Image: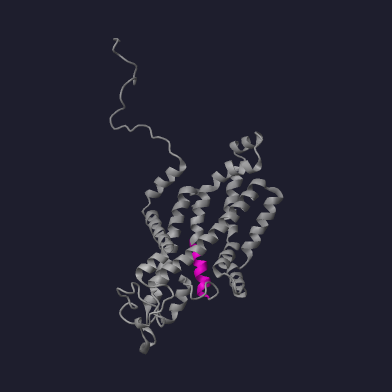
Amino acid sequence: MTSTDTAPGAGTPPAAGRSPAPTSRGPWRLAAAELRRRASALVALAVVALFALMALAAPLLSALGGWGPEEFDPSAVDPYLGGLPIGPLGGMSAEHWLGVEPVTGRDLFARVVHGARVSLLIAFSATAIVVVAGVAAGVAAGYFGGRTDTVLSRLMDLTLSFPSLIFMIAMMSVARDVNRILLMTLVIGLFGWPGIARVVRGQTLSLRHRAYVDAARVSGASHLRVLVRDILPGVTGPVIAYTTLIVPGMIATEAALSYLGVGVRPPTPSWGQMIAESVAFYDTDPMYFVVPSLCLFLTVLAFTLLGDALRDVFDPRGGRA
């Protein structure tokens, strides 16, 4: 062997076509990359963002349209035809972009965007209550075990055993002269926390005997420190996924209560209330029924598709039968 010979592989470039070793990426980057590969998740995220922005910018959008959600336009309806909108497709025109309500002549675009604000505010606020209460109960039950687990698990079972919709209707019907949005948020959140609590409890049970958790306890770390630094990061992924799946249920529940007449009261707009009022005109003015129903359908579908994608990414075993 001559002096110019080298050991095999030493100082030689990688073979052609061979890619260098991949760099390690964190779980959040891997999750984001996985979501970007799913067309349905990207479309759902775009729809969710659109409705969220529409709800946030509701006053600006209604001002841009030139009508408030409670303004009447008698010139847009025909009093000789029972108050039906004048013009095609429920009175759609350059002045009323989505048409008007029959009889009242209120602008449907302004009602829809403000209804999105009310519906999403209640849904997101109730979901926040559910997630905070559910995560706290689930982590406490799974980590401490014993009597704590027994009491919290029985409380979950008791809450789940209630016919929640009937109790919501009863509670909303009895309460008077209160903030309806706040009351609906609390009532819906009261019955929604056990589901996510069970998910978090199971995840915590699988984490509490991991080596790094035992090492933290042996080193003298307090229970609170172990929960915050070691347990909560491990349940964050599934919580995010299931939170996204909770939101469409909250939106549908608010719409159902408003549809039944025990939710948000007029003149405050909400999608469920608008659908209830449009039933009387579905054959003469179908657009009055279609517009809020389509908004509700698209929002619930988008959150459901996004939640399914997040669950597959963060908790793939949880989505399998």
Quarter of the image where one finds residue 116:
bottom left
Q: Is residue 259 above or below residue 311?
A: below
- The verdict on residue 251 being magenta is yes
Q: Residue at x 35, y 72 (%)?
A: 98
Q: Of 13 and 295, which appears nearest the observer?
A: 295
Q: Is residue 83 above or below residue 14?
A: below
Instruction: Locate the N terminus by quadrant.
Output: top left
The reply to whether residue 249 is in sight is no
Q: Of 16 and 255, which appears nearest the observer?
A: 255
Q: Is residue 155 above or below residue 63?
A: above
- The verdict on residue 202 being magenta is no
Q: Main secondary structure of the magenta part?
A: helix
Q: Residue furthest top?
A: 2
Tell me where residue 168 appears, x and y as whole percent. 59, 69
Instruction: Specify the color scheme.
Output: one colour
The reply to whether residue 276 is in sight is yes
Tell me where residue 105 appears, x and y as whole percent. 39, 80
Left or right of 18 on screen, residue 213: right
Q: Residue at x 32, y 77 (%)?
A: 89
Tell me where residue 242 appears, x and y as whole percent. 51, 54
Q: Of 98 and 38, which appears nearest the observer?
A: 98
Tell me where residue 229 appears, x and y as whole percent. 58, 41
Q: Residue at x 61, y 49 (%)?
A: 139
Which region of the structure is painted magenta?
248-260
Left or right of 241 on screen, residue 106: left
